[in-house]
Each structure stands twice: as structure tokens, then as C-alpha cells.
Image (cartoon, helix red, strand yellow):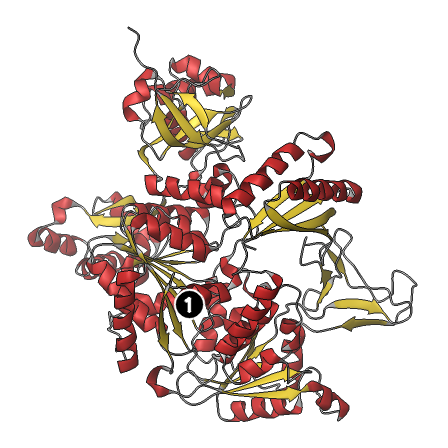
Amino acid sequence: MSALVTYVDVILPLALPQAYTYAVPVDLVDFIKIGQRIIVQFGKNRYYSAIIKKIHHQKPPVEAKLIEGLAEEEAIVTETQLRFWEWMSAYYMCTEGEVLNVALPAGLKISSETVIRFNEYYNGDYEGLSHDEFLVVQALRAQNELKVPQVQDLLKRRNVYPILKTLFNQGIAVSTEELVERFKPRTETYVKLNDKYSDDAALEKLFDELSRANKQVELLLAFTQLHHKTKFIRKKDLLELSKSSAAVLNALVKRGVFIEFKMEVSRLGNLQTEEVTDTQLSSEQQQALAELNTQHTTHNTVLLHGVTGSGKTNIYIEKIKEVIAEEKQVLYMLPEIALTAQIINRLRKVFGNAVGIYHSKFNQNERVEIWNKTLHGEYKIIVGARSALFLPFADLGLVIVDEEHDNSLKQMAPAPRYHARDAGIMLAGMFNAKVILGTATPSVETFYNTEKGKFGLVQLHTRYGNLELPEVVTVNIKDETRWKRMQGSFSSVLVEEISNALKNKEQVILFLNRRGFANYQTCKTCNHVYKCKNCDVSLTYHKYKNQLECHYCGYFEKVTTKCKSCGAVDLDIVGMGTEKIEDEIAELFPSARISRLDYDATKTKHGHTEVISKFENRETDILVGTQMVTKGLDFDHVSLVGVINADQLIHHPGFRSHERAFQLLLQVAGRAGRKNKKGKVVLQTADPLHPVIQQVLNNNYQAMYERELIHRRQFHYPPFARMIEIKLQHKKAQTVEQAALYFTNETRKLNKALVLGPAIPFVSKVNNYYIREVLVKSNQQTKDLREMKSAMQQVLDKMKTIADFKTVDVSVNVDP
């Protein structure tokens, strides 16, 4: 009887509709594990790292290829993660391969390799190589290059990747389309004393021998000083302390006094000086914590609804202590990288190096290191943006989603277009963990879920320390303009308040949710507006770069003095952005120190941290920013917040515009008067009687919520309907129009949903692709979202069989 063949179903980093099956060579059967990375061939001469999803003996309908080898011995993805990926691909209508691509750091992905070449610049030796590694080097030196099958033939084995990996890492070989680990551990040079000088007598004798060499004695003294503090002494630290040159150290190494060695170190840094401190809860916070624990006995998810400055973070910290005491892990999600800089400092003061950070500004090597530390349980707390959801938690006990209302928690591209709040609740459920959703301005859907009993609710009504909420005043810019009181973008009221704040040595935040200097450039003679050549949008003027930029595709043009349409020199820039506000405020207050917090000013890894740290340390008087300044930042000395244009938020297209305007305005208002005294907020608006403005003036969340519910029930929007948005794109307008009509008509025939569209969106062309949108809503008959998705998928699959529509790019956005 022949032995059973072992097969593995794997997830490839490709948008494949299902897992792909491979056969396992007999010699690898005992070593494979679910969640392990393996090397497989897919397509002609293309090799990928894939994740094992399932191990079985069921023969596939087509002959299965053999796997090429193991990328490592241990699994790097947990079985819970695989279940989470499967749920995410089903719910957000994408493939598991697309989820894998978003979830895994690039440093854990292996790309294909075809040719290996000898590195002619390698000048090291081959002493540490194994027999097989040396064989490959000899063949490379003789032939200069080899293909993977040739290496397999040479060594008479299929799994040659560990051997190639060694040669790549040591720099002996290079490749085109490298198949190497992108993650390389960071190493530093350390110094230790030769064992023969370990006892006091030998060390004293050594000092006597070196008595004439003063520099060497100083270096040896510095070493003994450092050795009292730490076992491992970095070469860099030793040279700094002794103020010696590398030549002095090299002389002692040659003499056999010191031994240099390399050691792998963390890229992430360790907390050396922070003292562990305890937070003191107010009586209201203690009551809220007790209520939170009570609510968690009946609800896995609880909304912590507290006014800005109520001290929600203190309650989070107490809950984290409880979870860590149970030897479980905590995921603390934030909408913005900017927020992690402040929160991480607060958490590390309490929890030290048990706290890890994870977000997109880390390089790939740092992300792999965090991944591995989370997998092995070295980090008990992970603070991060939405991508932290995908880390390999061993035993998650608590998920905190701070600022749960924030639209930054929703990924828009690429697929999966997930919402980190909803996905976090699902992930927590897989660990039987609890969830806290924290915010001063809950999303309408979340608050509705508390009313329906799906989520628990705990509320904080006062600021920590009984501080008063800021005074909010409106300024009618129509009146200010009529009476010629405006100074650029600033009303007389705002200018006066800024002046008073600066006189009192207090800080100011100015908020405008548009980056750049001006909206667009136009010719006053012929009215020509400078537009992007690839997109259906005007170009935004950036003064500091002296260019016009498209914020959709990145296209830019240098600013010219003549109109390219009529040749006139009468050009004007219209509108305003954060750069212009920064310029104008510098003219009004030339002695003030001004910083800007927006995407353009914080593109580097530590850009956010630097701007925030300067403001915290009072090295900046006025902070100008986009919505980044609204998100939970806590500054002690801000007495004034100025909103340059509140109407811009209110009159934005979309059914959530009033909700989001209220949230942004209330959040930015909450930055005023956080610690020392009652703050002030100045809202500049042309419509001070607008309901949203009035709701912000009165800090009335309930009024906003009830008004939104009336409109959404009337027009059948969430939470009274489920929605899926389909975006179709093609380089030909006629093709995308036909495809959108086909999808709309075919979906309507199935009678599983209300289908609206196709519509031409506000921005109808991006990067030379014409866009059409279709909105699918649940109807009275279709309560289950799965029925809607199934009907839509049928139509999308049929579309792929039609020749004219095969090149139409379709993206699906569930819960837009």
C-alpha cells in the first residue's frame, strides 16, 4: 500500500480567488506547520513565499507541484490570524492574498529569483561556509552565474534557499530579482575584556604594564567604569566615555587585552530613564472604571463616552494593568501616527519596555522586529495605527480603539478596505477579549449600538480636575468682510485673541483642514484654471516648493509668471491652505515661533514627533495644522484654538458630512484649556446659525445624534441600512460607463438590494482613469449583508467573462 501524499493549501501574496495546493516532499513532511512560510513556484520561473493555511491528504483535481523549501523552521503566522484573514477577505469582499499583502511586513515576503551571480567585489574568506555553500561559490566563480535549477542539480537537493540565503547575507553572491530575506538583523560592535584579566590581580598587573600609555589606561578605566553598570559594553559608548580614538582601542585588541564581537541589537530602542509612575484617578474616573468592569460582564464591547479632557487615557491604563496581570496582551489602536508619540510616552512611564509601537512610518526591518517580539510575547502592549491589527498576538486580552469615530481608522486603498474599529471587535472576539471604544464624539452607528443594547455605555461628563470646558464663540466673517475688519484670513476677534494669548505666554492652535498654500491658480484675463493633466482636479499651489501639485496623483508643475492659455501676466492664486495661514500669521506676529502640522510637514519617520515635541516643550508659540491637530493631542499651555473656516467642513459632499464636521470642530475645540485654565475657541463662519455650529457652541452631542438619525432613517442610510460602494475605473470613459451600467442593471435584476447609480463622482478622473460609482444598499427584504454580497459577486464574476470589461478595474468598499 503506497504512503499517503501530504498536501498543503497555501495563501500566496496574489489576488487569487482561493488557496493554492502544493505537494510536500517526503523529506519535509515532518517539518511543515500551519502558519509557516514556504517557498513555492507559481507561474513560469516565478518563486514566492507563501503561508501554509491547511495540511491535508486530499488530492487536488490537477497535479500539484512540489514545494521548493521552507523559509524558516517556525510558523510566523498564528492560526487565529489565519481565521482573521479569512473573515476579513469574506466580509470586505477581497482575496486572502490581498489581506496577506497588507498584513505581512515586506521584510517577511520573499520575491522571486531567477539568476544568482558571484559578487566580484567580495574580498572576505570562505572559512565559515558549509560544504554545500562552498560548492556553490566554486561553481559561481567558474561560471559567474547560475539559475536556481542549476544549483538544485549541483547539490542534488530541492531546498537550496537556506544555502543561497547565507551567500546573499554574507555578500558573496548577488541576484537579479533577489529571493532573500529582506529582514537583516541589526548588529553592533561590543567589547569585552579577555578572560585572562578577569581577576583583580591580573587586572592590576595590566594597569602597571600600561602605565606609560596614558590613552590606553584611560580607555581601560572607562571600560571598568561601564562594566559596573552593564554586562555588554558597546564600542561606541566606550570610545565616547574615554574620549579615545579607534586606534587606541585597536592597539589593545591587538595586544589581546580586549576582544571585539558583533551582537544583534534592537532597532526599536529601549527606555532607560523613565520612572514607572502610577496614575491617580478622580472619583468620577473610579466610578467609570467600576461601571466599565460591570458592563464588560454583559457586553464584550463598551463605549467610553467622555468629554474632551475627561481623562479617558487614565482609565485605559488601569484596565491595561488588569489585563497584564492576567499575562495577556493589549492592542491600543489610534487613528493617527501623530497621536502615538504622546500616548507612548505616557504608557512607557507606567509600563516601561513592555510597550511596543507599530505603524507605517517604521522601516521594514523595524516592522519585522516588532512582529517577532509580538509573536514571542515580549511585548505586552502594542500601540499603533490600524495596521497593528495584523500583528501575531499570542493571547490578546483587551482591544482599545481610541477616537473610534475617526475616519482614519478606515482603509481606503488597497484592498481590504477594512474599518479597524469593526475588525478590531471581530479580532477580540476570536480571543474572547474585551473591547473599549473611546471618544468624546461617538460615531452615529456606535452610539446607536449602545441604544440597542449591542454595546455597553459608560459616560464621563466633566473634565479631569474639574476644569471647565472651553468657551466657544463664533465670528461672522460676512460681517467682518463688510466692515473691512478681516486681515487676510483672520477676523479682528481672532487676531485680538491671538495677541492676548501670546502676551500671556500661552500657546495657540490654528485649524484649517486643507494643506498647501492656496486651492488653485487662475488667470484673471481669460479665467483659465490650472488643472492636473491626469486628473479632473485643479492643482494646489505650494508656496515653499514654488509649484502647483495634484494631491491625487502627485503630478506637479512649476509656477510660471504668464498664463499658458492666453499669455497674460495677470495670474492670481485663490483660496487658502495651511501654508498660507502660516505665512499670514507670521506677518501679523513676526516675533511668534510658528510650526505646521500637516502631511507635507511631517513626511519623515519622526516628523510628527518633532513638531509635537517642540510644541509640548514650548519651543513653538503657534501651531497651524489640518485635522492632525484635532486627534486627542494633549497640550498643557494651549489657551486658544482658532478655526479658520468652519463652513468648509460642513458643506463637504457625503451623508456623514455634518456628523464629521461636528466631530472635528468639537475635537479641535477640546485642545483649548486642557490643564491650567479655561480655554477659548473662535469659530470663523459665514453661517453662525447653522445647526452644526449651534451644536458645537452648546457641546450638544445628543442634538447632533438625534438630528442625524431622523435624516438617515428618512433616506435609508446607516445605521438603518447596510451599504457597499462599487468604484469602476478605466482609461476609456465609454468603457467604464458601459461596465457601470451593466453592473447596475444586472444587480437590480437579482432584487437583493437597492442599487443607486451609476454616478459620476465629484472627482471623475484620477491618474488618467475615468471613474464611475455605484451604491448598493440593503432593502427591506435583504437584512443579511451576505445575500447582498453574494448577488454582487455573481455579477462581478460574470463581468470578468465579457471581453470589453476584463480591463475595467473594480474596487469594492463595504461599509463606506
In this view, the residue in front, 622 or 715, is 715
In this view, the residue in front, 657 or 234, is 657
Residue situated furthest front in the rendering: 781
Where 48 falls versus 360 (above or below)?
above
Which quarter of the image is occupied by the C terminus?
Answer: bottom right
* Residue depicted at 55% across the width and 45% down the height: 788
Relative placement, left or right, of 407 versus 432 is right
Residue situated furthest top in the rendering: 1
Where 466 falls versus 170 (above or below)?
below
Query: Where residue 189 sits: x, y (%)?
Result: 32, 48
Residue with the mark numbered 1: 451
Where 464 falls versus 17 (above or below)?
below
Query: Where residue 437 sits: x, y (%)?
Result: 39, 64
How dense is the environment of label 1, judged by Cα within 10 Å: few (below 14), some, or many (20 and up)?
few
Can residue 272 be seen? no
Relative placement, left or right, of 596 versus 470 is right
Query: Where residue 754 sits: x, y (%)?
Result: 63, 51
Q: At numbered mark 1, what does the secondary structure look like: helix, strand or loop? A: helix
